[in-house]
Amino acid sequence: MELKNNALFKETCFIGGKWIESDSGEKIKVDNPANGEIIGEVPKCSTSETQKAIQEAQAVFPSWRDKTAKERSIILQKWARLIEANADDLAKIMTIEQGKPLAEAKGEILMGVTYIDFYAEEGKRVYGDIIPDPMPDRRIVVIKQPVGVVGAITPWNFPSTMITRKCAPALAVGCTVVIKPASQTPYSALALGVLAKEAGFPDGVMNIITGSANAIGKELTENPLVRKISFTGSTEVGKILLQQSASTVKKVSMELGGHAPFVVFDDADLDEAVTGAMQSKFRNSGQTCICANRIFVHEKVYDEFLNKFINEVNKIKVGNGLEEGIVSGPLIDQLSLMKVHDQVKDAVNQGAKIAVGGDVHSLGGNFYQPTVLSNVTTKAKITYEETFGPVAPLYKFSSDEEVIKMANDTPYGLASYFYSRDIGRIWRVAEALEYGMVGVNTGLTTKAEIPFGGVKESGLGREGSKYGLDDYLNIKYISMAGI
Ligand code: ADP
């Protein structure tokens, strides 16, 4: 890999400020999803290395906690500036291991920086409370303190922001972290570690271990020194981590799967709705947990919306993300591709029509055609399973009540979207949707200032905004008597 700063490409783990191999010497190969080439190998760590990382994080925790918020903020800001300065290289590393187009990768790197800048400031505003006591000689004081060592387990679809979104608030309030990145995208994580060291975080404040997900996850959840688990990934793995965390009653935040409804009412601005659907559905080749997964269109505007949508989808240029002009890269692996294709075949068997795409791409490998399915039935798998691919199923509806019921008919509750110009309907529908996030006349933008998170089986806790601090803080009540 040719980089301006070759030091960013690390093939060892970061524990206690040192770069180490796994105890067993075993490795995991990492490939480029655009062409299957092996990029390199990272250590296959397991229980013993995880214990070491947790011990390092625990040992440095008191001194990191006792720094002032401003002292921590200065190091966080230095980290942010270094990430910014190396954004081109970091984007290239991401595109090569994850597949997303270079411009999108750079956008993610810079987005990651906004979380660090936001929490470098917000970490100074960990306010407590004084509550009037019913007894005259007493005072009720509430303070907030960092929970301690945090275990952060992150996915491959956003290899950089999922790390900064967890680490920035955790580090800003005085926690220390042990990060386990996804095995498909370890290099983006390790590069952030290189820059964290350069920024001056004391040894052990941030640790990054690659390797066996089961073994590392089990140690992070069951080790009593870890006081919090922050996970982004599938609902299936989230449930395992919740169960394992029960043994030590840890604080948990879970950003899990989604099955976002995208509703177009008959009074919607259809051009805007098409733009929103394109952004929400096809970003990252449909591999985000907030991607529009079910597009419901009112029967009066169905045909018009479908035609406009097809026009736009036909323009998507698929290919290797390193090439100029590509807007949609490969899927992460063959397993993902097969799952997506299986959903498409099943939907067609259940009566759906293919309006665009519908098959693997002629480029081969992990590439799939951007696909639009019309007249999808509620029996099709795609109606109730998360897709994680560039496939947009369209459904027809005729009343508000009907579409709200269909939109909520899922165990997931992360993002939702709808388009309407009627203020009464906007309030009614926004309140009726059982989701953590609602985009009204927008494909919803994620940013540091918003509380990102879901309800139902989409998870617990919020990331971003002032609410994102709470997940890394304990509330302590101090009773002052004898006044
Ligand atoms: P996806 O389906 O998006 O790959 P996963 O939930 O499988 O999502 O993976 C998200 C993260 O969770 C990755 O870092 C992965 O290695 C990790 N992971 C997978 N299985 C486990 C497990 N049993 N315990 C802990 N972490 C796990």
Image: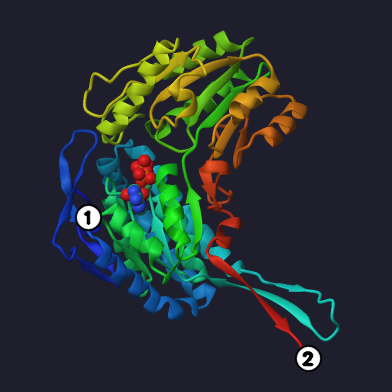
Q: Is residue 122 visible?
A: yes
Q: Is the CB of the residue bearing disc 1 within 8 angstroms of ligand 1?
A: no
Query: Which residue occupies 58% across, 49% down?
Result: 451
In the image, 70 versus 438, the foreground residue is 438
What residue is shown with label 1?
9
Left/right placement of residue 21 relative to residue 476 reads left
Which element type, helix, strand or loop, lies under badge 2?
Answer: loop
| Amino acid beneath label 2 | Gly
Quadrant in which residue 194 is drawn = bottom left
Q: Earlier in the sequence, mark 1 or mark 2?
A: 1
Question: Between marks 1 and 2, how big is the CA–CA gap?
Answer: 60 Å
Above or below, 207 against 287 in this view is below
| Residue drawn 52% across the image and 73% down it | 70
- The image position of residue 361, as x and y in percent, is 27, 20
Residue 334 placement: quadrant = top left
Mark 1 residue element: loop
Depth check, front residue: 242 or 3: 242
| Image quarter (top left, top right, bottom left or bottom right) of the C terminus | bottom right
